[in-house]
Image: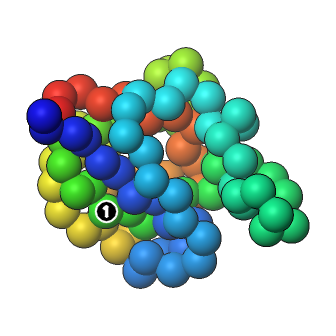
Amino acid sequence: MNMAELIMFVDADFGGLHTHVFDSTADFTKLALGGVGTNVNGTWNDVLSSFVIVSGHWAFFKDINFQFQQGEVLGPGRYSFVQNFGIDNDAVSSVRLVSS
């Protein structure tokens, strides 16, 4: 079974908090920034600055429900700063898995 995986970071150069995403996520306001017992409040909405695509091809969107795609569909690789790839910093609200 081929599983897609995207690792998102709140800071450039893969710094700060991170989370793993395995499928399309339509609304980052429902994706908690911190885990249970971490005392970290907030959501992943509008905080993405860098990411690693372990597998799959992903599209990034400015708004929830896959509205206003930013940049091109991207595949496996290390993306140290979103702005280098046509994505506004701290401005992603949903991601779509295009292919795994």
| 95 sits to left or right of 1 | right
> Looking at the picture, how far across and down is residue 75, in whole percent?
16, 48
In front of the other: 23 or 61: 23
Q: Can residue 68 be seen in this view?
A: no
On screen, residue 41 above or below 11 = above
| 79 sits to left or right of 42 | left
> Looking at the picture, how far across and down is residue 25, in whole percent?
49, 30
Q: Which residue is drawn at 25% across and 41% down?
A: 4
Q: What residue type is labelled 1?
A: Val
Position of the C terminus, as image quadrant, is: top left
Q: Is residue 48 visible?
A: yes
Q: Residue at x 40, y 58 (%)?
A: 7
Q: Residues within 10 Å of mark 1 (few under 14, many from 20)?
A: some
Q: Which residue is drawn at 70% across and 34% down?
A: 30
> Looking at the picture, how far across and down is residue 20, in whole percent?
45, 53
| 62 sits to left or right of 50 | right
Residue bearing the label numbered 1? 52
Q: In which quadrant of the rendered view does residue 52 lie?
A: bottom left
| 32 sits to left or right of 2 | right
Position of the N terminus, as image quadrant, is: top left
In front of the other: 8 or 2: 2
Q: Which residue is drawn at 61% across and 29% down?
A: 27
